[in-house]
Image (spheres, rainbow, N blue to C red):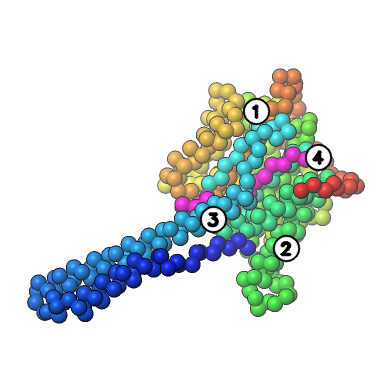
Amino acid sequence: MIRIKARAPTARAAVLPTVWGAVAVGYKLGCPLAQQNGLGARIVTSAVFFAVGTGLIFQVRRTLLRELRLARRAARAAQSVVLRPPPPRLDGLNVAAAQLSADRGASVGGDLYEAIGTEHGVRVVMGDVRGHGLSALGTAAAVLGSFREAAHDEPDLGRVLGRLERALARHLRERARAEHPAHGGQDPAHPVAEEFVTLLLLEIGRDGELRTLNCGHPWPYRLSGTAVEPLARTDPLPPLGPFPLPPEPEIRTCGRLLPGDSLILFTDGAEDARDARGRFFPLREVLRTAVRDQPAPPQAVLGTVFTALLRHTAGRPADDVAVLVLRNDRGRAGRPRTGARDGDACGSAARARPASMNRRPTTHL
């Protein structure tokens, strides 16, 4: 659990309220005008106490704003540590990511993403924790911390998912014990029954082969030239948390990410964002606009998406939004443009490659 502790009031912060109070008491007890009952004396007395009250209100407001700025600064620091920006280039991939919090004036949310280059390929996670704020940030930290280790340690994507599931369950048990001390040292039967995390695991091989595991998360879009298509159209596994996952989940192969192609990973806050008339955000059409004339770099795609999203929601999205863009810049000049192009490559169980469980993990942090 992440905690932000407010700073204790200092002696300097208490000086001004004390002075204002001393002025009011001194005027009431020591000024002859304050003892009179005439209209003029009453007006002066009211003006003095109004000035004293106004000064106290402004001082309290100033103190609260200062504490709020400190809390936001601490929250941004925690967010930057948990949701660190990905490297601009990763094993031949051009990477860009951005996140928008639903909490006004804050940068803390429940979305999570990470891209790591490993000996097994580039491994990517995109997830969405139920809710937003500091509690969601703590859950995202638990999942991301496990992924950053498991992505290097486990040669099989199914084992990575198993590590994430166990890390989430362990975090929820610890959080339940902290929130309900009456349980003592025993694990509660249902730690946090309503908590869950949607998750997409993606592995991009050196040859561009795409292997995925999807737990209740929106499928990414593939950008090929000026075409925008979903990576897959199959039903995902249930989200992490409410239900146990299969011991050996089926890993789906979704064709190849050819040189020049891009993947757009996002959380459901993007497509579920609504405008004042209740219309959903047209993410696919916005992506088509971004690549209408020519393939756009990931940074330009991000700028187009978030500009359109803020315009669509009038600057007030109802949910956290995260977008991660990966473009394959490996040998763009010499690769033939053949192979599986659309989500149908993921739609057939015959194309899915079963998980291999006989390789030894390597250790890296």
Mark number for residue 224?
A: 1
Between the C-alphas of marks 2 and 1, the distance is 40 Å
Between the C-alphas of marks 2 and 4, the distance is 27 Å
Q: Is residue 173 magenta?
A: no
Which residue is denoted by mark 3 in the rendering? 74
**Which badge, 1 or 4, is on the more N-terminal residue?**
4
Nearest the viewer among 278 and 59 is 59
Q: Nearer the viewer, mark 2 or mark 1?
A: 2
Magenta residues, as a range? 101-120
Nearest the viewer among 279 and 260 is 260
Q: Secondary structure at mark 3?
A: helix
- Taking the image as drawn, is residue 222 in sight? no
Q: Is residue 107 magenta?
A: yes
Mark number for residue 170?
A: 2
Q: Would residue 22 appear left or right of 9 to someone viewing this image?
A: left
Q: Quadrant of the N terminus?
A: bottom right
Query: Residue 186's x, y, as percent?
Result: 73, 75
**Which badge, 2 or 4, is on the more N-terminal residue?**
4
Query: What's the residue type where badge 4 is placed?
Result: His
Which residue is denoted by mark 4 in the rendering? 120
Query: What's the residue type where badge 1 is placed?
Result: Ser
Query: What's the residue type where badge 3 is placed?
Result: Ala
Query: Residue 237's x, y, as percent?
Result: 72, 51
**Which badge, 2 or 3, is on the more N-terminal residue?**
3
Query: Residue 210's x, y, as percent?
Result: 75, 37
Q: Nearer the viewer, mark 1 or mark 4?
A: 4
Between the C-alphas of marks 3 and 4, the distance is 36 Å
* Residue 225 versus residue 277 in the image, above or below: above
